[in-house]
Each structure stands twice: as structure tokens, then as C-alpha cells.
Amino acid sequence: MDPKSSNHFIRIYGEPNTATYRVTNAQIIAHITFMHIFSILQQRWKLSAKNRKGIRFQEDPEWQPDDRVVLFQHFF
């Protein structure tokens, strides 16, 4: 076994023996399914981030109200 993959295997499943190999084989379909679903979600998140248009509020420092703009109106 490759030393790098051996270290990763030990980190996730523990020391390699018959029991850990059995657990690994039982979980391989779940791992593949999870990674497939996760990759689809990542693609959706990337596309939604690109397509999102935000509202930008900018203030114009030279703007002055004119007669058409009623800022406060009191009715007596």
C-alpha cells in the first residue's frame, strides 16, 4: 500500500485490518453518492453566485431637491 494513502486510510478508518476493510467496502457506495451530490451542489452554488445581481445604493453628493420633490408635507 502507498504510504500516502495508508496515512489517509488510518486517519479515517483506523489501523488496516479485516474489520476496517469490511467497513470501508460497506461505505464506499455511500462515499461515492455523497461526493456526487456534493459536487452537484457546488456547481449550483457557483452558478447562482455568478448570476446573482445585487442592488447597489449609491448616494449622489451633488443631488439637490427641486420643487417636484416633497420631502415633508404637513396637512393642517
Image (tube, grey):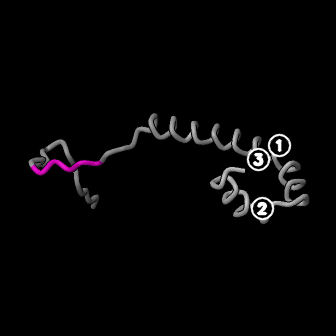
Q: State which region is magenta.
A: 57-61
Decide: marks 3, 2 in contact (CB < 8 A)? Answer: no
* Element class at badge 3: helix
What amino acid is labelled 2 in the image?
Tyr
Indicate which label's residue lies in the foreground, 3 or 2. 2
Q: Which residue is under mark 1?
A: 29
Indicate which label's residue lies in the foreground, 1 or 2. 2
- Horizontal relation, residue 39 to residue 57: left or right: right
* Element class at badge 1: helix
Decide: marks 3, 1 in contact (CB < 8 A)? Answer: yes
Q: Which residue is under mark 3?
A: 31
At horizontal 26% and vertical 59% (from top left) the residue drawn is 74
What amino acid is labelled 1 in the image?
Ile
- Residue 24 inside the magenta-drawn segment: no
Q: Nearest the camera: 42 or 74?
A: 42
- Sequence-wise, which precedes: disc 1 or disc 2? 2
Q: Nearest the camera: 50 or 8?
A: 8
Q: Dot 1, how many residues are within 10 Å of its Cα: few (below 14), some (14-19), or many (20+)?
A: few
Relative to 65, residue 8 above or below: below
Residue 70 image point, x, y percent: 22, 50
Q: Which residue is under mark 2?
A: 13
- Residue 60 inside the magenta-drawn segment: yes
At horizontal 76% and vertical 47% (from top left) the residue drawn is 31
- Horizontal relation, residue 24 to residue 56: left or right: right
Q: Distance between the residues labelled 3 and 1?
A: 5 Å
